[in-house]
């Protein structure tokens, strides 16, 4: 591996964990709802259903 696991973990945290936490804390996602992750213009897009 060129970079290793630590940079990958930081990227996952920044691009997925933090936005998901904001959705949960903001009430956008409730128990039992699904969160769909798509890629739009090279960026992750989270949406709830």
Image (cartoon, rainbow, N blue to C red):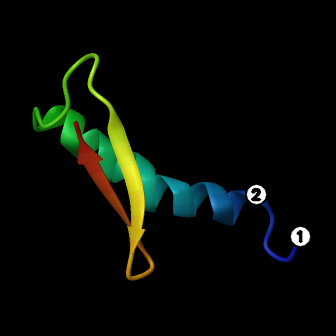
Taking the spot 32% from the left edge, 44% from the top edge, the residue there is 20
Q: In the orientation shown, which residue stands out farthest toward the left?
A: 27
From the viewer's perspective, is residue 18 above or below residue 8?
above
Cβ atoms under marks 1 and 2 closer than 8 Å: yes
Compute the Cα span from label 1 to label 2: 8 Å
The residue that disc 1 covers is: 1
The residue that disc 2 covers is: 5
Rendered location of residue 36, percent (x, y): 36, 45
Q: Quadrant of the N terminus?
A: bottom right
Q: Describe residue 20's horizontal placement relative to residue 13 as left or right.
A: left
Q: Quadrant of the C terminus?
A: top left
Callout 1: helix, strand or loop? Answer: loop
Q: Describe residue 28's horizontal placement relative to residue 22 as left or right.
A: left
Rendered location of residue 21, percent (x, y): 29, 40
From the viewer's perspective, is residue 23 above or below residue 46?
above
Rendered location of residue 2, percent (x, y): 85, 77
Q: In the orientation shown, which residue stands out farthest toward the top?
A: 31
Residue 22's quadrant in the figure?
top left
């Amino acid at each position: 591996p060129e970079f290793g696991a630590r940079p990958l973990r930081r990227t996952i945290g920044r691009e997925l964990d933090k936005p998901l936490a904001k959705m949960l804390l903001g009430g956008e996602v409730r128990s039992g709802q699904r969160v769909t992750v798509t890629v739009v213009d090279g960026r992750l897009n989270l949406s709830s259903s």
